[in-house]
Amino acid sequence: MKIILTVCAFLVSVLSLEAQHVYDAIDFGAKGNGVDDDATSIQAAIDRCSQEGGGTVLLRGQHVFVCGPLQLKSHVNLHLESTAVLKANPDERIYHLSAFGKNEGEGMMWIFANHAENISITGKGTIHGNGIAFMGAELDDSYELKPVTTFDPRPHVLTLTDVKNLTIRDVTIKEGAYWTVHLIGCDGAVIDGINLLNNLKIRNGDGIDLDHSKNVRIANCYITSGDDCICLKNRREFEQYGSCRDITVTNCVMTSRSCAIKIGSENMDSIYNVMFDNCIITASNRGLGIQNRDEGTVTDVTFSNIQMDCRLWSDVWWGKAEPIYVTSYPRANGNHKDANWRFPKGQIEGRCGEVARIRFNNITATSENGCFIGGDTQDKVHHIYINNVYLTMRKTTPYEGGVYDKRPCKGEGFVTGKVHGIYVDTASDILVDGLYVDWGQGTFPKRGFAHWEKYCQRFVIKNEIDGL
């Protein structure tokens, strides 16, 4: 009986493999020589695969497939074999499909999908955004951005809109020129085991942006980004897709010149039911940030079991080494992009929504600065719970400390003063149960206190140690 069952299982496995249709891009004319543009051939393979009911579009190893814009379609698994590279064509003239609809001032699309289902991107190969090719001169702390007005040709790497049942697994994605993985209105996505390696000097180089998306699981990823590593938001261009909710992020390692994990700043809807757990953050300008700058709300978010070290970078990057940052301020009136797209139609000023029921459990951080919590009124930021937070204050850079970054907001963008373990400025119902601050052996510049608060209603603190 065991022999019969074994034979049957083997036959089922063989038949299953035979049933999987593989569409080799080279069979469709792709050269993979690192010079010729293979977009037409790869697109033909994708189209055929989708039309015939689905399967795998294969990019073979030992090949570099240079290509312009590609559209992924339903029931297609784009599989990159180990040593296969899919690389963005550096010719700016071929990118003319906006990543933000009618808003053409914030980049174009390279690899994209619209209103599709059952899409996968898998394999041990590399998707290379060719980011430096779209930059200006290299500066000390960043790359100069080329001057643009209302049209920016820089390509986003992956822009996936209204995709149901999406999987991105095991691939390496690197050197994005703008945002890297952007999920818009997606439902049911898994991002697992990827290496997302953006150049730390490229501005606007977000790692993963979840925009009006729900039921998303991110796990086991390594992310380096000049801008935010993982960001949740609700941009106004895609308001038809509703809230961003039911998100889990686990077992990830991140480095950012801005904020490693951020919620906001674009948020015209609601963000809720979110869990970040068991992550490590290194050398980031800000660790865990909620940056609400629009009328949307952020509620029921938990950060737990996170180890991080933060440090100061220049003002090119948002953040002032705050390990924990929870804020809600009205957005500043800005440049042409802000005036046209950040505010409700016909308005040039905005308002900010509430941030509430945010929990921080078992957080350990080494940083040049303390945590910051604040809003424009006491009812905007409330019911913030901080449990077992261990802060080690260490000065590691020559940048001046004692500054908290409120940008982008109306009025003054920075708060200056002393460095406190937790600084609360205009909020309510803050409960701290277990705060431990180590100031080191020497004199910490602009040293303040373990906690400091003003204009805060109901601030309760238990089990505080100021100076271990």
Image (tube, rainbow, N blue to C red):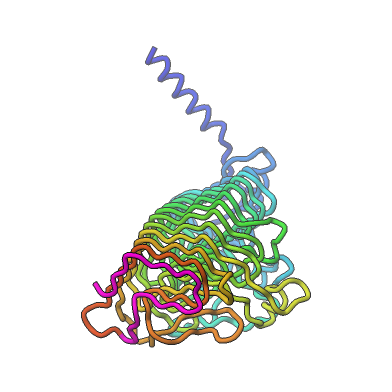
Residues in magenta, as a range: 445-468
- Residue sitting at the far top: 1
Residue visible at 57% across and 56% down in the picture: 272
Relative to 355, is 451 on the left or the right?
Answer: left
Instruction: Give the x, y percent position of residue 266.
Output: 61, 69
Residue visible at 45% across and 60% down in the picture: 359
Viewer-proximal residue among 127 and 179: 179
- Residue sitting at the far right: 346
- Residue sitting at the far left: 441
Viewer-proximal residue among 178 and 281: 281
Image quarter hosting the N terminus: top left
What is the magenta segment's predominant secondary structure?
A: strand
Instruction: Give the x, y percent position of residue 256.
Output: 44, 70
| Figure label count | 0
Instruction: Give the x, y percent position of residue 289.
Output: 48, 68
Q: Quadrant of residue 403?
A: bottom left
Say whether residue 463 is magenta.
Answer: yes
Viewer-proximal residue among 330 and 171: 330
Question: Taking the image as drawn, is residue 178 in sight?
Answer: no
**From what the image shows, is residue 323 above or below residue 120?**
below
Say whether residue 341 is magenta.
Answer: no
Question: Taking the image as drawn, is residue 25 in sight?
Answer: yes
